[in-house]
Amino acid sequence: MSKNTPISDPLTPLALRRLQAEIHMNSARVLRGMERRVQILFEEEGIMNLTPAQANVLMLLFHRRKAARANVLAEEFSVSEVTMGRFVHALEASGWVKRDRDPNDARAWLVSPTPQAYGTLGSLITVSNRMMDEAFRDFESGEIEAFHAQTRRV
């Protein structure tokens, strides 16, 4: 190493903790900003009575390609069963999902998208693609791969 090469001092524990806290706050700001932008894009696409979080539940159901119990969705979505129950209730009330008895357990319900949801899938994909294009506009593919790896680690 030449004497002109700067030597990076390790962060003090307090500086490291502050940086971690800032990353946490930045992550929350990014999420809120993306949700606000998705809501605007929904309105532009004519998608009403659907929040970005509810749309994520729908997209999870579309991705699964089969009905699922709410507790399974809660685990995959990393929320409590009570929270997922609220999502399902709101989605059902707005006509986005239906619930049917689980043929393997009469006490349980399976949640699946309705024809209304399938009819909106193209618009949901359009909104998702626009959001991702906007959010990652100035990123190169290697940066996106690295960011993905880091967020999965966290």
Image: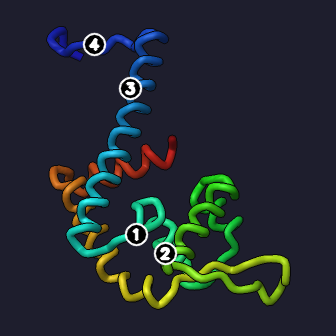
Identify the residue shown where x is 50% and y is 80%: 95
* Circles 2 and 1 in contact, beta carbons < 8 Å: yes
Q: Secondary structure at mark 2?
A: loop
Q: Which residue was labeled with disc 2?
A: 94
Is residue 14 depicted above or below 23 in this figure?
above
Is residue 125 depicted above or below 75 in this figure?
below
Q: Secondary structure at mark 1?
A: loop
Query: In the rendering, at what x and y percent does residue 151 appear?
Result: 44, 46
Q: Amino acid at mark 3?
A: Glu
Q: Which residue was labeled with disc 1?
A: 49
Identify the residue shown where x is 39% and y is 22%: 19
Q: Quadrant of residue 37?
A: bottom left
Query: In the rendering, at what x and y percent does residue 94 appear?
Result: 49, 75
Which of the pair 100/10 is nearer the observer? 100
Is residue 107 depicted above or below 5 in this figure?
below
Which labelled disc corresponds to residue 68?
A: none
**In front: label 1 or label 3:** 1
Q: Amino acid at mark 2?
A: Ser
Q: How many residues crowd around disc 3 within 10 Å: few (fewer than 14), some, or many (20 or more)?
A: few
Which of the pair 41/93 is nearer the observer? 93
**In front: label 4 or label 3:** 3
Gap between marks 4 and 3, in whole Å?
A: 24 Å
Q: Which residue was labeled with disc 3?
A: 22
Precedes in sequence: disc 1 or disc 4: 4
Q: Which residue was labeled with disc 4?
A: 7
Number of callouts: 4
Q: Secondary structure at mark 4?
A: loop
Identify the residue shown where x is 44% and y is 24%: 21
* Circles 1 and 4 in contact, beta carbons < 8 Å: no
Q: How many residues crowd around disc 4 within 10 Å: few (fewer than 14), some, or many (20 or more)?
A: few
* Circles 4 and 3 in contact, beta carbons < 8 Å: no
Q: Amino acid at mark 1?
A: Asn
